[in-house]
Image (spheres, rainbow, N blue to C red):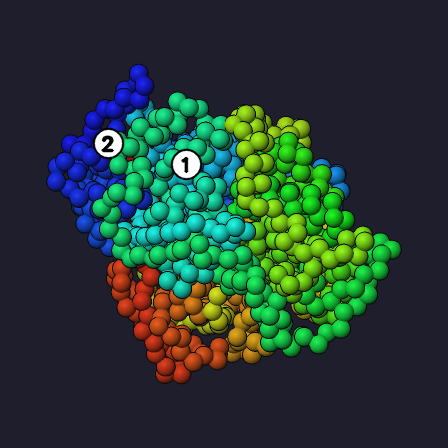
Amino acid sequence: MLDVKKNIKVGRKSYGIVSLKSLEEQGYDVKSLPYSLRILLENILRRLDGVNVKDDHIKAILERKRVEIPFYPERIILQDYTGIPVVLDLVAMRNAVTRQGLDGSRINPVVPVDLVIDHSVQVDRFGTSYSLRENMELEFKRNEERYRLLKWAQKNFSNFRVVPPGNGIIHQVNTEYLASVVVEKDNMLFPETLVGTDSHTTMVNGIGVVGWGVGGLEAEAAMVGEPMYIEMPQVVGVRLIGSPVEGVTATDIVLSLTQTLRKKNVVGKFVEYFGPGLKSLTAQDRTTIANMAPEYGATVGFFPVDEKTLEFLLLTGRSREKVKMVETYLREQGLFYSEENEIRYDDLVEFDLSKVEPSIAGPKNPDERISLRESKEKIRGIVKDLGLEDKEPKVIDIKGEKVLMGNYSVVIAAITSCTNTSNPFVLMGAGLMAKRAVERGLKVKPYVKTSLAPGSVVVRDYLERAGLLPYLEALGFHIVGFGCTTCIGNSGPLIPEVENAIKENDFYTAAILSGNRNFEGRINPYVKGAFIGSPMLVLAYALAGRIDIDFYNEPIGMDPNGREVYLRDIWPDSSEILDVIKENIGPDMYRERYSRVFEGNEMWKELNVPEDKTYAFDPGSTYIKEPPWFQEIKKEGIDDIMNARILAIFGDNITTDHISPAGIILHDRSLLKNFDINRKETWANVPPAVIYLLQNGVSPDDFNTYGSRRGNHEVMVRGGFANPKIRNLMVDVQGGYTKLYPDGKVMSIFDAAMEYKSRGIPLVIFAGKRYGQGSSRDWAAKATALLGIRAVIAEGFERIHRSNLVDMGVIPIQVEKLPTLRGDEIVNIVGLRDPYPGKKVRVVLSTGAEVEGLLRLDTQAEIEYVKNGGILIYTLKKILGQINQ
């Protein structure tokens, strides 16, 4: 066993540490490790016991071996969409233990857990001073039952805190308040690490905390003390040089990096930033860049702690004593950034900040960067390729005002998302722009749905203190909520007259948002193009009213005197923005707001929760049901899959939004025009989840979103592959349809899956590259499993979704190229018995075609999970063994 314990003094107090310097002094090469790997090293070195963590694990990191290593996150964060299924699984686990005659109340998180309620608020109301209040009232009305469950969980689970709705977005709250960077526990100091059930957990990498997004299933296992097993990651070093030029924002930088790193292929790797360019990035710039690590494919986007990080900690209200402790510990451990180092990266990318130019990304992927200078030509080219360029604009009447709209009209403009609302530079910049626009007499076009949804209440405080919020409100950017809203698809309905015009004319309309994702159909089903840009560009496009504007050569609008106003006339310079920030933002604002972050508003306080230690499920509930995972315990083992049918064949870039949508359940009410609950022949084209809710007496007005109903597996399995934008290549129609074989009948994917299940037929799906990209949505894997899909054969998997499939007992198989498929083939997968990481299997079709595939069970732990039917059953078996001892 290695002797690496020592004490250090911070002020007058002495703390124990596990010393990386001591390890270096014993002849081990720590200095060549990237900072992020040094933190992983400390994480397991501190737990070295010869049983769960062995000397070989330590050597694996030091020698950079691509083997499986354990990882123990110090903390876990959840949001409500992914968090409610986690809570329900814990409740179901308690009930399963109780059914065994044991004490179920002993099932508790052993790792601290914070759940931030931020995903449920929708933009139903906008453009008025009372939009915030009305949206919050609607949020509580729709989600009262879900919120009671969370309040009950806070009361009954140990190590479990809830940040009530209306306090901000999970990652901004985490970065500004929850994160400690260095943990003090039992008189020991060590680096903070965490995982979160949201892919943008990586935002905290921007202040030197190693953490990433995982599925809720992995998080549950970690909560009850199971180590997470990861393959030793490769680390790509991104050397930043130069400084951003005037007019370039952190949003432009991250969109450029996303494009660059996607081409580099950093999927499943750590990205670590270093170099002289770091000095020109604030901590908030860095958190913007780290936030979008999932978009460029990396597991983490890590920035080591330096003086800029310490400045941020002080600004956001951390005490001077705490910040001194962070600095002292990290310097002692060789974890404080220095340009003089001997780090060896697995690969290097040089990125020149001075070459970044103003940009947007779209129309349906965040790595589709478009230079603002070229945007008009490129966007018109996109529309031309769709055959829509000849559409004539139409005059529509909005509240008595006649206005011309058509192709290219911007119908949603949303300043939203923790990605950018965490950065005062772009928000104060938008405020100053709004001031100048109002002073020049500019107005937003009436067909644009505008919204401002900050990730922290502090944003409102500093915009008010700076006197800029009234100008944003004058242009329609009233605060609509302190939550994710448009970024996750909760943009709410379009202006009715606008929606009707789009339906009648099939216009190519656009959304512009300061978010991190713009996948097809995510923002709004009637918006064909969704573009990401900085808050300042969101405001600019709202004023222009069209996405095909050349901001460099065309006016953004006309003042009341008929004079042209260009974007450059209202765009503030950097020094002006920085002065406003310096004068109006201070630690007092953060301390005051976050001192009450766990209290909640009056609606939260008035929620009554039962006193029972066991959660009482309401059989009539359509929101909360006990999950089915523990009703049947699978025997251990993996067999070949024989005589399977194909449920779906997909192309490239299928997202978890496609697989398990989060947005509104019924996009088009006209589908219900001839619907009769008693006549099955009228059910065609009606989504299965809609039929279920109607059968259970739920009015269409109360359907809510898929995300809000993740506590009901009956809704969610029916929502599997039900995104109206998904394309199954087995059928000619768009949406969640397939063809049942050998019958040849076209029906919903859910109905076909249930019919196959009744016949005892296993199912597989085939897909192209980047299958499962997007949100860390465990329901995308849960729905897959509940539909009876035993294996997914794809040309490539995104990291989190592959892991989630494994955690649900679904087998991922990666092939070089899909075979030619019709959809009526019978499929055998041979070679699954006696699995091991890296094993090759055979996918054999009834046509005689055969393709070799790589079994993507990447670690021995993953093999054990699949053998037992998934990580939940595996964990329960282990806990029952522990409790019985």
Decide if residue 860 is on the left or right side of residue 764: left
| The N terminus sits in image quarter | top left
Which label belongs to residue 18? Answer: 2
Q: Are marks 2 and 1 in contact (CB under 8 Å)?
A: no
For marks 2 and 1, the one nearer the N-term is 2
Task: Tell me if residue 531 comes above or below residue 618 in the rendering.
Answer: below
Task: Tell me if residue 173 comes above or below residue 231 in the rendering.
Answer: above
How far across and how far down the image is residue 547, in percent?
Answer: 65, 62
Question: What residue type is disc 2 on?
Answer: Val
Question: What residue type is disc 1 on?
Answer: Thr
Farthest left residue?
Answer: 27
Instruction: Work out whether residue 569 or residue 437 is closer to the camera in this orientation and state it.
Output: 569
Instruction: Work out whether residue 21 or residue 687 is closer to the camera in this orientation and state it.
Output: 21
| Mark 1 surroundings within 10 Å by alpha-carbon count, few (fewer than 14), some (14 through 19), many (20 or more) | many
Decide if residue 251 is on the left or right side of residue 570: left
Instruction: Give the distance between the C-alpha atoms of the residues marked 2 and 1, in whole angstroms.
Output: 23 Å
